[in-house]
Image (cartoon, coloured by chain):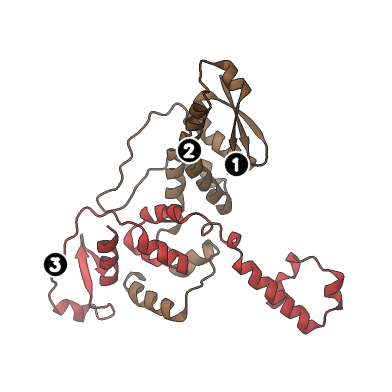
Chain colours: A red, B brown
Amino acid sequence: QKMSHVSEIDVTEQMRQMTLNRLVDYFEAHKRDNINTKDNCLFLALPNKLIGRVLSYLPPKDRLRARVSKKLNAIEAESKYYVKELTIAEVHSDYWHMQSRCFPDFFFSEHNPYSFDCIRRICTSA
Amino acid sequence: PNVKLVTSDNEEFVVDFRIAKMSVTVSRLMEAMNMSETDDASLLSNSIPLPNVTKAVMARVIEWCEKHKNDEPKEEKENDKRGRTTHVVSDWDKEFLKNDEFGRLCQLMGAANYLEIKGLFNDISQTIANMIHGKKSDEIAEMFNIHCDLTEAEKKEIRKKTAWCED
């Protein structure tokens, strides 16, 4: 697995002289460099405003699931939710026994359950 | 009448005045440079520099503009009843954007934003959103080649709060 990056590197004379351990270290460093390069992910290289724009096209579930890096998490928290109306209602407590796999902090809107975290985000960014 | 556009890699594109006007940015620059449709000399002696757009991306932008040059200006609904921005991508646009690999799509989005071509920008935003829609977190990360730099604590927090939508 460590050697999978060989094809991306031009083998130099210096590398031919390296011991196997040093060579592996070299590849590991090269791999890290690649990961840290911004260009590695062209989507994250876009300005925050544009990434936020893409998120605004998504329903809350998809938006929350898209928080797969620090940057996306921060953008999601900042970008706006467009909500026309929000109905908050108390739900009978028996419901939670039936839905034991879920967290007991849900709201319902048009039959979709939303977690407190989601509602909080909607309320602060709407 | 034609307008000359020059990309960051010094490629000159000669396009119809109407095509050039589809970009708010180009339109503003032409105004600032006193270039007008009725003054051929002003169009011939000037060219519009576009330092944020490369030749390859510009060619795609112009292709899109050629197709849409006769479109009626349409009112975009900012959001629908489910509370999000929506934009209908036409079949031609879907087919057009299918040809671009994801990296190019991002470059095109950057260019459409810089050039202020709203229709193209909305098309691409909606297309990328459609790619994310319905996917799980790890699938999104893999698709976009995103290296997860969240700490274990942050991951745990997010997992806890998104458990309800991972079904």
Q: Nearer the viewer, residue B143 or B109?
A: B109
Whether callout 3 and callout 2 share a subunit is answered: no
| Crowd around label 1: few <14 · some 14–19 · many ≥20 (10 Å) | few
Q: Is residue B25 above or below residue A32?
A: above
Between label 1 and label 2, give the one nearer the viewer: 1
Q: What secondary structure is marked by label 1?
A: loop
Q: Rounded to the nearest whole Å, what is the CA distance between mark 1 and mark 2?
A: 29 Å
Q: Rounded to the nearest whole Å, what is the CA distance between mark 3 and mark 1?
A: 54 Å
**In the figure, residue B136 lies in which quadrant?**
bottom left
Which residue is tagged 2? B92
Q: Is residue A98 above or below residue B44?
A: below
Between label 3 and label 2, give the one nearer the viewer: 3
- Relative horizontal placement of residue A73, taking residue A31 as reference (left or right): left
Which residue is tagged 3? A89
Q: Amino acid at mark 3?
A: Ala
Q: Is residue B152 above or below residue B53?
A: below
Let me know if residue B78 appears in the view.
Answer: yes
Position of residue B138 measured from the top left corner of the image (x, y, whole percent): 48, 70
Q: Is residue A73 above or below residue A20?
A: above
Position of residue B165 measured from the top left corner of the image (x, y, whole percent): 33, 69
Q: Amino acid at mark 2?
A: Trp
Which residue is tagged 1? B51
Q: Rounded to the nearest whole Å, what is the CA distance between mark 3 and mark 2?
A: 44 Å
| Crowd around label 3: few <14 · some 14–19 · many ≥20 (10 Å) | few
Q: Nearer the viewer, residue A110 or A18?
A: A18
